[in-house]
Image: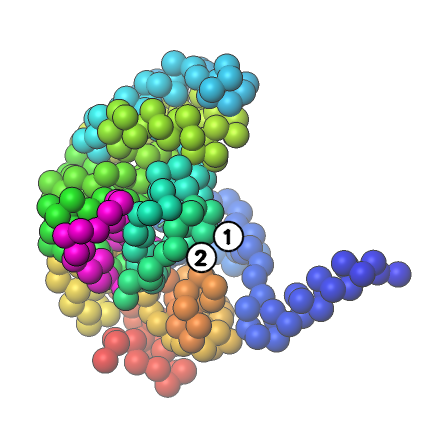
């Protein structure tokens, strides 16, 4: 006999499936870069965030000897987990993104669910882009803020001169599901007027000259920059880049930093190997290849995003079941692009979120574009947005 909770969850799962919203992780095997097996099928993946292809690299291939370091920090950083490997990595990250300090967190989700609440006070005004990542939405819910939602890519309104408190703007730099960018000119004006900017660079850190961020490339100075280590860096974890003072406060008050075991020193040492590669000639070569691949696919898909170009291509379909059916048809041809459905994206905007990596070969991109054309045509859908 099923317990009440088992029965209820079974019903909920069936409801999700009926709505085309069931989620199951595709079981990846034998991954080598963008090629892997899904069941018995060999596929090329076009949906990871390993933009520079570092995730599967052995440390020796990245040109640095492997360093041994303890697996665990053993405690929270504030108790006895503040080891040299972590401090060294933080210093390197701060230098890379051009901030005084950096604070490591086990994941980007933990950065965004802990840092906003530590920094926001009740009399602040908080503006957040409508399409911000779930971790930012949850992080703002955990703060004292009454959040004002901004239309996508629009800036907070200009404040009355008598306005009190900090005017926060929370935004991604390259938006994870849209692939477009924050309005940089508006961000500059917001900062010039004394507003505070919290910029999540999860999908842009590592992709620009020297391996840095979109903000640094454009000489924009957000108060808080979030970078993740699980995407272009090809490892896992995340950090906040900020001033020395804010870093001190975050270390003392961000609950997802204070009440968690310190970042793994073993992983920190490995991340440093990846960062050395990311910043050096291999990183430059991978970035060049990545952007050349991005431009090729942009052309093949008949898109023209101009300065908003990114490795993320949303192919918006709308209907959940249809998005899944299209993803299945592509999989049958050897292409893995996972369908993304609500609540990851807004209702009625289910899509294939196609991402390009430096490791994709020209011929693969051309073959994928042809397959996309065939499959979308068979479903009576345009591949190029009107
Ligand atoms: C914009 C954005 N912020 C934060 C995160 C969370 O980062 P992490 O995967 O390190 O938890 C993600 C990744 O999924 C993201 O896309």
For mark 1, what is the residue?
A: 37
Question: Magenta span: helix, strand or loop, mainly?
Answer: loop
Q: Where on the picture, by quarter, is residue 224?
A: top left
Query: Which residue lies most toward the right here?
Result: 1
Question: Residue 183: x, y in percent?
Answer: 17, 57
- Is residue 163 rendered to the left or right of residue 236? left
Where in the figure is residue 56, as x and y percent of width and height?
A: 40, 38
Residue that appears at 44% across and 43% down: 113
Front residue of 331 and 294: 294
Q: Are marks 2 and 1 in contact (CB under 8 Å)?
A: yes
Q: Secondary structure at mark 1?
A: strand
Locate residue 23 relative to residue 265 in the image: left or right.
right
Seen at 11% across and 51% down, the residue is 189
Q: Which residue is mark 2?
A: 43
The residue carrying pointer 1 sits among few (fewer than 14), some (14 to 19) or many (20 or more) residues within 10 Å by Cα, namely: some
In depth, the one of 13 and 124 nearer the eye is 124
Task: Give the quarter of the image for residue 339.
Answer: bottom left
In this view, the residue in front, 166 or 5, is 166
Range of residues picked out in magenta: 152-176
Quadrant containing the C terminus in the rendered view: bottom left
Position of the N terminus, as image quadrant, is bottom right
Residue nearest the observer in this picture, 366 or 156: 156
User: Residue at left 39%, top 72%?
Assistant: 349
Q: Residue furthest bottom?
A: 380
Q: Residue 117 vs residue 156: left or right?
A: right
Residue 76 in view, yes or no: yes
Instruction: Examine the structure image and report whether residue 3 is included in the region drawn in magenta.
Output: no
Q: CA distance from mark 2 to mark 1?
A: 6 Å
Residue at image point 39% right, 55% down? 146
How crowded pointer 2 is (Cα within 10 Å; few <14, some 14-19, many 20+) is rated as many
């Amino acid at each position: 006999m099923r317990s009440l909770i088992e029965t209820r969850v079974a019903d909920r799962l069936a409801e999700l499936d009926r709505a085309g919203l069931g989620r199951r992780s595709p079981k990846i095997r034998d991954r080598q870069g963008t090629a892997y097996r899904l069941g018995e099928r060999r596929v090329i993946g076009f949906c990871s965030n390993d933009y520079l292809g570092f995730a599967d690299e052995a440390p020796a291939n990245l040109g640095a000897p492997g360093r041994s370091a303890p697996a665990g920090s053993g405690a929270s950083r504030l108790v006895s987990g503040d080891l040299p490997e972590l401090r060294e990595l933080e210093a390197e990250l701060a230098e890379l993104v051009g901030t005084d300090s950096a604070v490591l967190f086990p994941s980007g989700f933990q950065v965004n669910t802990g840092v906003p609440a530590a920094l926001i006070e009740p009399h602040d005004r908080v503006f957040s882009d409508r399409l911000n990542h779930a971790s930012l939405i949850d992080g703002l819910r955990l703060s004292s803020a009454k959040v004002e939602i901004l239309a996508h890519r629009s800036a907070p309104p200009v404040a009355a001169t008598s306005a009190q408190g900090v005017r926060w703007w929370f935004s991604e730099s390259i938006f994870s599901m849209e692939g477009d960018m924050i309005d940089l000119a508006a961000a500059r004006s917001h900062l010039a007027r004394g507003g505070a900017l919290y910029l999540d660079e999860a999908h842009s850190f590592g992709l620009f000259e020297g391996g840095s961020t979109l903000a640094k490339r454009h000489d924009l100075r957000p108060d808080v920059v979030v970078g993740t280590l699980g995407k272009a860096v090809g490892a896992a974890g995340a950090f906040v880049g900020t001033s020395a003072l804010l870093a001190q406060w975050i270390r003392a008050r961000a609950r997802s930093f204070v009440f968690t075991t310190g970042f793994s020193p073993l992983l920190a040492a490995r991340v440093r190997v990846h960062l050395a590669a990311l910043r050096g000639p291999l990183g430059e070569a991978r970035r060049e290849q990545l952007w050349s691949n991005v431009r090729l696919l942009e052309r093949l898909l008949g898109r023209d995003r101009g300065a908003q170009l990114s490795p993320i291509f949303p192919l918006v379909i709308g209907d959940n079941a249809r998005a899944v059916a299209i993803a299945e048809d592509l999989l049958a041809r050897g292409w893995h692009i996972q369908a993304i459905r609500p609540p990851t994206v807004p209702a009625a905007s289910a899509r294939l979120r196609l991402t390009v990596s430096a490791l994709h070969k020209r011929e693969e991109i051309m073959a994928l574009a042809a397959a996309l054309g065939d499959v979308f045509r068979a479903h009576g859908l345009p591949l190029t947005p009107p």
